Image (cartoon, rainbow, N blue to C red):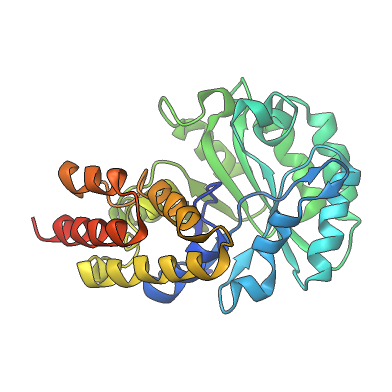
Amino acid sequence: MERFIISTAPLQGFTTHLWRRAHHAVMGGVDDYTTPFIRVERGTVRRRDLADAAPEANRDVPVVPQILACEPAEALMMVRELTGMGYRHIDLNLGCPFPPIALHGKGSGMLAHPERVGELVSALAAAGHVRFSVKMRLGWDDDTQWQAILPLLDALEPVRVVVHPRIGRQQYGGEVNMTQFEQILATSRWPVLYNGDITHPEQIDDLRKHYPSLAGAMVGRALVAHPALLRPERATAEHHRAFHNMLVAGYRSHLTGGDHQVLSHLKALWQLFLPDAPARARKAIKKATSLPTYLAAADAAIEAAFHK
């Protein structure tokens, strides 16, 4: 049996190259990290997206860059940039559920338009020198729309198909539809990874037991909340302090706006990070107005999360 793959789902604003490097160095347990989607804006590939995916920014980290497009020309523009960086595995986003994206026919919004998906994958299949994977949902507004999409992916001969078993209109609410997921798993000619609502490593064990043909799992928000999720032996204050310190150092060296900008990014991390930290400790982080005050509050919150 092929090795079971653990990948990370991208979260815009959270799983940047700085987060990926800190996680890989301190926590680990991940086979590869998918970047937040790269897109074309005003006729060019966004420079900040490419900078985040650049190999020199992701030193020693196994990265899969992800592209978001509905037009073949835009997708190929991104592929040229990424293959020029040396990438030979690129992920295609057919799963983003956020209305500003999906209602413009991108991400999961494409799943209601198989003719557009067909044009896109045909163009990508002819790109050469690169393999693709696909991250998708069951559909945009119908949980059987995947049935028209999955055969189209054969043109890509995808490395893997990552399936989040909700429709795009659900975003992250409601129940996952495991009946439809099981049909995809039984139908797909290509390796399938499961994504959605994984919050404990035991769930991955259960998925492997129930679905022996499953090729892997992709973990998202829960890994930002609990960076040691996949390596429970590292769920200690010491490891989380080391992870946080590396992230602080990364922000301080990378951001040009001084301590105020660093503080803003670090506070945003705590929207998800260590939800078990006591409310009083989290309030002190929110109220911090200087980096030294923040660092003291964050250190106290990390300590409190593991020594209640």
Q: Residue at x 28, y 54 (%)?
A: 202
Q: Nearer the viewer, residue 285 or 146?
A: 285
Location of residue 60 in the rendering, given as x and y in whole percent from the top left corner: 57, 79
Location of residue 120 in the rendering, given as x and y in whole percent from the top left corner: 84, 42
Q: Residue at x 32, y 55 (%)?
A: 226
Q: Is residue 3 visible?
A: no
| Left or right: 83 in relation to 56 | right
Location of residue 16 in the rendering, given as x and y in whole percent from the top left corner: 55, 58
Q: Residue at x 55, y 37 (%)?
A: 183
The C terminus is located in which quarter? bottom left
Residue 56 falls in image quadrant: bottom right
Q: Nearer the viewer, residue 287 or 9?
A: 287
- 218 above or below 303? above
| Left or right: 178 in relation to 205 | right
Q: Residue at x 32, y 50 (%)?
A: 203
| Left or right: 100 in relation to 122 | left
